């Protein structure tokens, strides 16, 4: 599949190097009053054959007056049925391989927002796919808004999805499964499974984002 420039997707958590805690990976976006916020995401999941292509836009906001530069770790769900992504792309910023994901550096001026596009393609060898959402908890604040579209071939019939649809659109060749959330603190990852494939369900958490220790 040809990927759209400027799109991205996936769960994200921040690695903060704060004064006195240099190099320490903190479990949240920062201490109370920390100005950097993961504000929203727009995610398109496109399914073809055994491949999931995720195209997303992640918006970050610096509510403080001072500029911030931090490393961001973008994790992937990995197990023996969900190998490391075939393709990972962003908006030209350098990406560094890390434990169960990639890292990039984000610079954000005071009282500004930044939207980061990320794209990746990953195979689901058992007719299932997992997109990590629960890493949002690491920011200790909910997303203001999250929008999701899952597009798949119409002849697949119905999918099993871990979040209910707000709307389902049936086209001549594809179906779109659409849902949106506001004030969204995910309690589970986005798990998708074909019902026309005889395979076991995925096991969310086989590679938990909390266990990542990027190098």
Image (cartoon, rainbow, N blue to C red):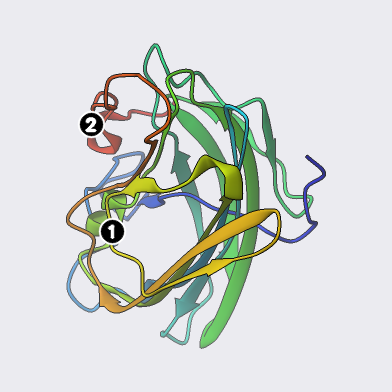
Above or below, comparing residue 6 to residue 51 in the picture: below
Is residue 153 something one can see in this rendering?
no
Q: Percent from the top left, x then y, of residue 140?
A: 20, 65
Residue under the image location 52 percent in, 83 percent down: 110
Residue under the image location 55 percent in, 62 percent down: 176
Q: Percent from the top left, x then y, of residue 82?
A: 45, 22
Above or below, comparing residue 200 to residue 150 in the picture: above
Numbered tag placed on residue 205 in the rendering: 2
Toward the viewer: 177 or 37?
A: 177
Q: Percent from the top left, x then y, of residue 119?
A: 65, 47
Q: Which residue is mark 1?
A: 163
Q: CA distance from mark 2 to mark 1?
A: 17 Å
Toward the viewer: 107 or 161?
A: 161
Toward the viewer: 162 or 11?
A: 162
Residue under the image location 57 percent in, 30 percent down: 122
Comes first in the chain, label 2 or label 1? 1
Numbered tag placed on residue 30 in the rendering: none
């Amino acid at each position: 599949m040809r990927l759209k420039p400027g799109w991205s997707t996936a769960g994200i958590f921040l690695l903060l190097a704060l004064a006195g805690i240099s190099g320490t990976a903190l479990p949240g976006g920062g201490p109370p009053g920390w100005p950097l916020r993961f504000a929203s995401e727009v995610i398109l999941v496109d399914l073809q054959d055994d491949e999931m292509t995720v195209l997303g836009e992640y918006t970050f906001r610096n509510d403080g007056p001072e500029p911030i530069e931090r490393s961001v770790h973008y994790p992937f769900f990995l197990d023996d049925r969900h190998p490391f992504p075939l393709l990972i792309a962003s908006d030209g910023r350098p990406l560094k391989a890390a434990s169960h994901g990639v890292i990039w550096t984000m610079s954000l001026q005071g009282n500004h927002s930044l939207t980061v596009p990320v794209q990746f393609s990953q195979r689901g060898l058992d007719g299932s796919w997992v997109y990590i959402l629960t890493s949002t908890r690491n920011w200790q604040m909910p997303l203001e808004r999250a929008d999701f579209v899952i597009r798949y071939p119409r002849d697949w019939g119905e999918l099993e999805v871990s979040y209910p649809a707000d709307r389902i659109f049936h086209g001549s060749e594809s179906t779109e499964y659409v849902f949106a959330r506001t004030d969204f603190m995910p309690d589970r990852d986005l798990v998708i499974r074909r019902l026309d494939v005889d395979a076991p369900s995925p096991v969310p958490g086989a590679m938990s984002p909390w266990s990542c220790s990027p190098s």
